[in-house]
Amino acid sequence: MLPFRFHLLDGLPVSDQLVKAVQRAVLTGEMASGERFPSVRVIAQELKISPTTAHKAVLELRDAGFLATRPGAGMVVVKPAGSSREQLLSQLAPACRDLIRQASLLGLSQAETLEALRRTYSEQP
Amino acid sequence: MNSLLEFQQVNRRFGRSKALKDASFRVPAGSITALLGPNGAGKSTALKIALNLLRPSSGTVRVLGTDSRKLGPAELARIGYVADGMELPEWMTVAQFLGWCRPLYPKWDVDLERALCKQFALPADRKLRQLSRGQKMKAALASVLSYRPELLVLDEPFSGLDPLVRDEFIAGLLELAGSEGFSVVLSSHDIEEVDRLADHVVMLNNGEVIIDESTEDLLARHRRVEVVLPEHFGDLPALPATWIGAESSGRVLRFADIAHEPASFNEQAARIFPGCPPPDVQRYSLRELFVTLVRAGKADAGV
């Protein structure tokens, strides 16, 4: 089992989904700084995805400062410097884009879309 | 990128019928390549030619740098082949079978053999004939993974396997994947099985290669588009050549954009469908894309 919550969805690149899931897990503290990150082979086997895809995601996470190479231990989790609020907000961007797309298909304006969002918020228990 | 397997304009005839027509495609080093196509598309023929079990009628296949017609024991010891329904020495036990294979391969890894037998829960003293289909396929896979082949060729490896066994099988072959240069080519008529496993896709239809591309690039450039036309739109204008397989029902027009680029798409859509709400543009799953391409009958969709 992998040490972060992850559920693959159709229609989005697998490596992007993996990167987002790990970023979320690090930002929310689900995975702690210094924790050992699973190897490419383990990720591929767990998710039944190609190692190339898993490798690509790992490199992207390393370049974005979420993983670091530790000699002898493979990759470890790093909580990147900078505003986590900013990074958490950017996690929502794909869902927001989807909402905007849905709204435009319905012919709704920005104000109406925000109104729908507010309404749904107020209906939350 | 280097290719471990490369088809160059390969034709193969059986009597009057053509199983492969000018087929060119490659299996990049380090990739898991899916060879997809409906039954009878030429997948098994292609894999048999790659292993010199069949000869091409014309064209060349290079395997590990060697012409497929000149593959000898030295090259074959670097290739693993497992096919659905392949003949195995049914009278042997699992242990006898692996012991029989072992001396044939200088690079046989006994530790890996043991690990695979454990991972696959193979009963060492059962005869192959007494094994279920899934167990037989796992025994066959263990017998080829154990010599750490550089190229693994799997012909319909998942057909008839239940989902649990299929997952074990995939985890087993991924045991080697990721090690330097190890490449897999596997054929399947069921795309769902290989959707996420494959990072390179070759699609065959009627013996012709219609796609030979990385999964990522392939999915990145295709979009399913739906447009709602105004009530009295009249005749459809001519669509760009990269918008294929157009069909309509009521006011909805649907087509596939096979070279999607958001900016130019929006510009073209606004010009061709004036006064329409913005089109609904969605990515395809590999499965939907395959069905769409075959249906659109675009032999040149990959160009």
Image (spheres, rainbow, N blue to C red):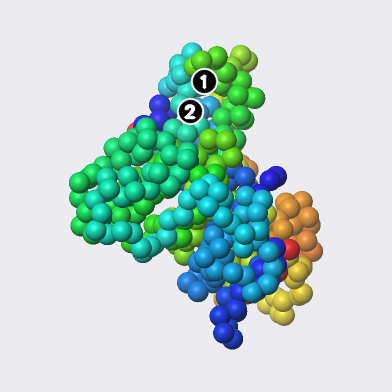
Give residue B56's position: percent from left, percent from top: 62, 70
The reply to whether callout 2 and callout 1 are in contact (CB within 8 Å) is yes
Counting other residues with Cα less than 10 Å from the Cα at mark 1, is it few (<14), some (14-19), or many (20 or more)? some
Single out the residue that lies furthest toward the bottom: B16
On the rendered structure, is B180 left or right of B118?
right
Q: In this view of the protein, which residue sits in the foreground, B18 or A15?
A: B18
SS under mark 2: loop
On the rendered structure, is B92 left or right of A41?
left
SS under mark 1: strand
Q: Residue at x 56, y 55 (%)?
A: B72
Q: In this view of the protein, which residue sits in the foreground, A106 or B224?
A: B224
Q: Residue at x 62, y 54 (%)?
A: B63
Counting other residues with Cα less than 10 Å from the Cα at mark 2, is it few (<14), some (14-19), or many (20 or more)? some
Instruction: Report the residue marked by disc 2.
Output: A39
Query: Which quadrant: the N terminus of chain B?
Result: top right
Give residue A23's position: percent from left, percent from top: 53, 27
Instruction: Report the residue marked by disc 1.
Output: A74
Q: In this view of the protein, which residue sits in the foreground, B60 or A5?
A: B60
Compared to residue A33, the image places residue B242 above or below, namely below
Q: Residue at x 71, y 79 (%)?
A: B234
Compared to residue A33, the image places residue B34 above or below, namely below
On the rendered structure, is B65 left or right of A79?
right
On the rendered structure, is A43 left or right of B242?
left
Residue type marked 1: Gly
